[in-house]
Image (spheres, grey):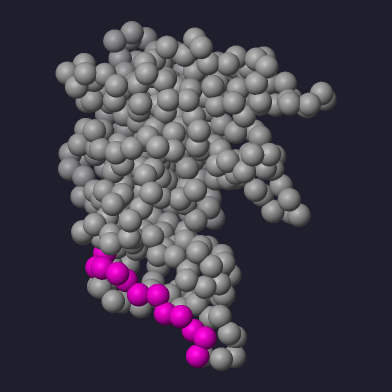
Amino acid sequence: MKTELIKFAGDVPGNEIELRVLRFSGSDQNAATAYLQSSLHGGELPGQAAIHFLVPLLQKAADEGRIKGNITLVPQANPVASNQWQTYQHQGRFDTFSAVNFNRAFPLLPDFDTSNLPQPDAPEALIKRLKAALLRLALPHDIVLDLHCDDESENYLYIAEDFVEDMKDLGVALNSTAILAWDTTADAAFEEACAHPVLQMPADKRNMKRRAVTTVEFRGLSDVYAEQGAEDAAGLYKFLVHRGVVEDASVQLKPDYQGLVTPLTHVEMIRAPQGGMVFFHVKPGDVVSEGAKLATIVTLPGNPDGDIVLTAPQAGRILTRRSLRYLRRGDDVLKLLGDKPSAVIKRAGALEA
């Protein structure tokens, strides 16, 4: 394994960051190649734990000459977000300068040519240079896995509709509960920016059985355990073996994905009509019927007349819920995966800001 440090001057004198990149060289130029990054939101650590335990597996394979395709790992993809703290709380989702989600506004390139993206020393804002560097690292690879996590959640994937059928093997390898299928690049998230050049290619040139681009949601923010990280690493390793990036005759992948495949239009985002304290009546993984009680928001403590009961707009599976128990009006409370389109009109793009 080789370690590369990419240095970026800060936006004001006296500040800089560095991006640590881990590389394994493959022995077969025809093998699929893979790029994995984690912690684009700084404090989302389950993916970072998975990479931590994946590296020894890959190092052993490298020592034994079993790395077939080039592999690039970026365990801490956003040092800017990692360092954003306020009053002892980590604030890694949004850039505190622009208030833009760090996983938005990536360049949507028409092809795989990254030569016009700003270099680390370009006269551009740091976050633009960092996003350009991440795309420059990722786009040469056939497989791009962006490892995230939700708030309180099951393990699930975001995958472009055109990729879904040929990427169910990743759902099998990671034991994912659900695949959320999207069909727009309106938000220009990292995954969308990496899928965009592929989706611009003629359908007969894409070779979708070789390519894989996804956002992996490794459960919730607090699901950071050595045992779980090792299990997730084993799943990632199994996928890389299955796709021919790594050779390992001892690894076998079950053929059929048993989880849900849900279009974003079928996802019910249950939001708080008023602020207050919330009591949940369901947890991620629960299957509910239409009208089932999901949560109670207490708006007037001591007066039950102020309680607001949130119910399921349709039957489905609870995928995520909020970890904080104090809500503002309009906050997301739960995600429910339904069998039919939601009656709520959604804006184009991802589900949350």
Residue 204 is at least partly visible in this image: yes
Residue at horizontal 49%, vertical 18%?
Answer: 136
Viewed as shown, does residue 350 lie left or right of 204? right
Q: Is residue 88 magenta?
A: no
Residue at horizontal 36%, vertical 16%?
Answer: 111
Q: Nearer the viewer, residue 297 or 248?
A: 297
Residue at horizontal 17%, vertical 39%?
Answer: 255
Q: Where residue 56 sits: x, y (%)?
A: 49, 29
Q: Nearer the viewer, residue 252 or 236?
A: 236
Residue 41 is at least partly visible in this image: no
Q: Which residue is the extreme one toward the right?
A: 14
Residue at horizontal 49%, vertical 56%?
Answer: 151
Q: Nearer the viewer, residue 120 or 71?
A: 120
Q: Where residue 253 sits: x, y (%)?
A: 24, 37
Viewed as shown, does residue 37 lie left or right of 202? right
Is 189 situated above or below 303? above
